[in-house]
Image (tube, rainbow, N blue to C red):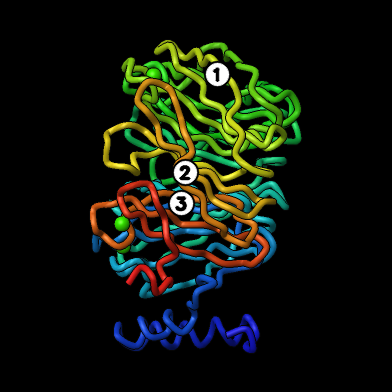
Amino acid sequence: MKFLSLSSRRFLLLVLVAISSPLAAFATDMDRNSDGYSVGAFPHHVEVADFNGDRHLDLAIPSSASREVTVMLGDGKGGFSSIRNYPVGQGPTWVAIADFNGDGHLDLVTCNAGEGSLTLYHGDGRGGFSGRRDIEGVGGANSLVVGDFNLDGHPDLALALVASSQVQVLRNGGGGRFDHLPPHGVDTAPHIIDSADLNGDGHSDVIVGSLGTHTLTVFLSRDDGSFHPPSASKVGRFPHYRGYGDFNGDGHLDAVVAVSGEEAIQLLLGDGRGGLKPLPLIRVGVNPHGLVAGEFTGDGHMDVAVANRTSKDLAVFRGDGRGGLKETFRTRIGEDVITLALGDFNEDGRSDLVLILASAGKVRIYTGDGQGRFIPIGNPEHR
Ligand SMILES: [Ca+2]
Ligand SMILES: [Ca+2]
Ligand SMILES: [Ca+2]
Ligand SMILES: [Ca+2]
């Protein structure tokens, strides 16, 4: 549908989606070809959730150059029955999903790096979003993560503020009303913030990668929502996306990070107390960026998939359960993949990947075969 303008394409999609489900499926088939589904300009991030409660995985994708977040409702067969764009603030780089107002339906929030704001939408539980509310006063925020840091049952947000090299928690007082807590200093140029329970106390901790110092900083949570003094681990140059899992089978969560300046990934062994010990770099390709950790091969050991933005390929590393990672699969993508996420989109019991093609403005699903290989779902070889 390249020949249609964005607004007319949006209108056509809205009309088709509004009619009936067989036609809606037809609409998205039209929108999809072997290149993938078109979304906004420069999609930057993706989150996977079931927004409409039909047990099929859905996607939310902020597009940083088009001030919108795209919501794609999955059909359970690796396709999408509805694609809708919602306007947000300028330069959205990140999205997070949770039931912020406690009505039982998942909501979404984008981090709008272009203007230092967040845009919150309330989900209706049927895949639609409304009640836009913008939260100002988060200048320099680049990424955010959800966590119930003070254990009151209301999901809070933690933001990486790249301009001021700080981490800030926005505490949800209930109903999706957020209080800005005093920020914490972090190493220079924090980029990606995420969370994992590194010390195994059942409580999400916050991890931030800093591009200025090439470090990962861990903030262990206290029960009242405050953090212990942070500790940092030196990693390879330019840490980007991370995955978490117990790679060496000692019962402690470990981290694996794409370090683009080294053309490598790096495993960091967790000590169960929040410490992360970096292991030697593993070369992967040019400009690795997106990364997920999961069990792709059926042997019960954690594996890693990483996308190389400049060499435009995807590599899978099979974990041996003892902290070893060995490349077992590589496929050419031919596009600039900024990030990827994991989910069983065709519901065959095997993990699949969603790839976000930044420069192309597209989304592609690659189905997993359960043995560590991933094939684009439009590929006839896979039918
Ligand atoms: Ca769904
Ligand atoms: Ca809600
Ligand atoms: Ca471990
Ligand atoms: Ca699957």
* Residue 350, percent from left and from top: 28, 52
Amino acid of disc 2:
Val
* Residue 202, percent from left and from top: 32, 22
At horizontal 64% and vertical 47% (from top left) the residue drawn is: 136
Residue occupied by mark 2:
316
The quadrant of the rendering that contains the C terminus is bottom left
Label 1 packing within 10 angstroms: few (<14), some (14-19), many (20+) = some
Residue occupied by mark 3:
47
Relative vertical location of residue 118 with respect to residue 57 in this rendering, above or below: above
At horizontal 54% and vertical 62% (from top left) the residue drawn is: 69
* Residue 271, percent from left and from top: 43, 11
Label 2 packing within 10 angstroms: few (<14), some (14-19), many (20+) = many
Amino acid of disc 1:
Leu
Q: Nearer the viewer, mark 3 or mark 2?
A: 2
CB-based contact (under 8 Å), mark 3 and mark 1: no
Report the front residue among 297 and 159. Answer: 297
At horizontal 55% and vertical 32% (from top left) the residue drawn is: 257
CA distance separating discs 1 and 2? 18 Å
Q: Is residue 223 visible?
A: no
